[in-house]
Image (cartoon, rainbow, N blue to C red):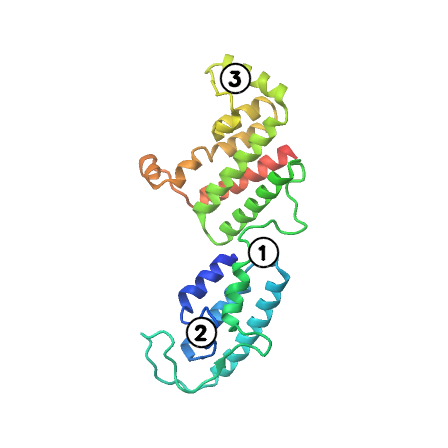
Amino acid sequence: MRQYVPSEVVAYIDRELAFVPRDLSRSQVFTVSRHIRATLLGLVEIAERVPDHLVVDTDALTDIIVSVQAIRTVAREAETQPVRSYDRNVPGAFPVEGPELAPSADAQWNPVILIRNAFERCPDGAPAPHVKRLPFVTDDRLRHTLETDLDGVDRALAGSEWKAATVLGGSVVEALLLWSIQQKPQELQIALAKLQAGTPKKNLGPDPEKWYLSDYIAVASEMNLIRPTTATQASLLTGFRNLIHPGRVARTGQACNRGTAHAAQAAIAFVIEDLK
């Protein structure tokens, strides 16, 4: 089942429920027609598909839970209302009769805006709690970033977002290999010397952070940080950066699909297994 991130909930409200006032100077009460009922239930569905660990604000969580229940209650009432005509071309033009979605006694905002404001305060990316897939990465900031990216790859795969999964997965593999070779500076220099003397020669610049994935794979392999099978799998992602730019995609003929996305996922698993 596809998951959503907080910004997608906000975008849904801004697109589908744009008529709901964003300021308290206007009435926060509106009548719920059959059409609006369906839209509100869609909001509830999307809001409940946001992973719990992304709702990092306790007040936001409370607002979301209370507002979702308020919307469900009014939606049940709207289901029993007779169908009445109204102008579908005019946002906010509802039948005169019907249940109303209004602020609760202890809140001034309409539940729709409470949900919007709550999710607006939440991040789109954060590592899932108690899930540490990269305990061997000693740099706390890098580990947090990469675990967040790994969650992003999982969400992209679940949502069939092949380009996002491929590109983000490639960047994770690249970052892991860069980090691993930087942990052994002496072995790194020996590997570089062997590669430069080999056939064909591989002349790399002095700054590893400016290399490409193929360079990291070659050096990590020479340093015996990754197995040959891992190098082969990771090599399938060579050129993943080109997939970010439409012009390069057109020139190279590369494209993202289910295969490239799952290749990225497999490469990540191989690299993690070798480095841990």
Above or below, 47 against 217 in this view is below
Tag 2 secondary structure: helix
Tag 3 secondary structure: helix
Which residue is at 51% across, 29% downward? 209
Instruction: Say which mark, if any, is on residue 54.
Output: 1
Which residue is at 59% across, 59% downward? 55
Among the two numbered marks 1 and 3 on one chain, the one whose residue lies closer to the N terminus: 1
Which residue is at 48% across, 54% downward? 159
Kindly identify the amino acid type of the residue bearing the numbered disc 3.
Answer: Leu
Closest to the observer: 2 or 142?
142
The local crowd at label 1, few if under 14, some if 14 to 19, many if 20 or more residues have their Cα within 10 Å, is some
Above or below, 222 against 48 in this view is above
The image shows residue 162 at horizontal and vertical percentages of 44, 47
The image shows residue 237 at horizontal and vertical percentages of 47, 35
Evaluate whether residue 4 shows in this view: no
The reply, left or right, for residue 85 in relation to residue 207 is: left
Evaluate whether residue 230 shows in this view: yes
Which residue is at 37% across, 40% downward? 245
The reply, left or right, for residue 86 in relation to residue 31 is: left
Residue 32 figure quarter: bottom left
- Between circles 2 and 1, the one closer to the viewer is 1
The image shows residue 114 at horizontal and vertical percentages of 53, 68
Query: Label 2: which residue?
Result: 38
Kindly identify the amino acid type of the residue bearing the numbered disc 2.
Answer: Ala
Residue 37 figure quarter: bottom left
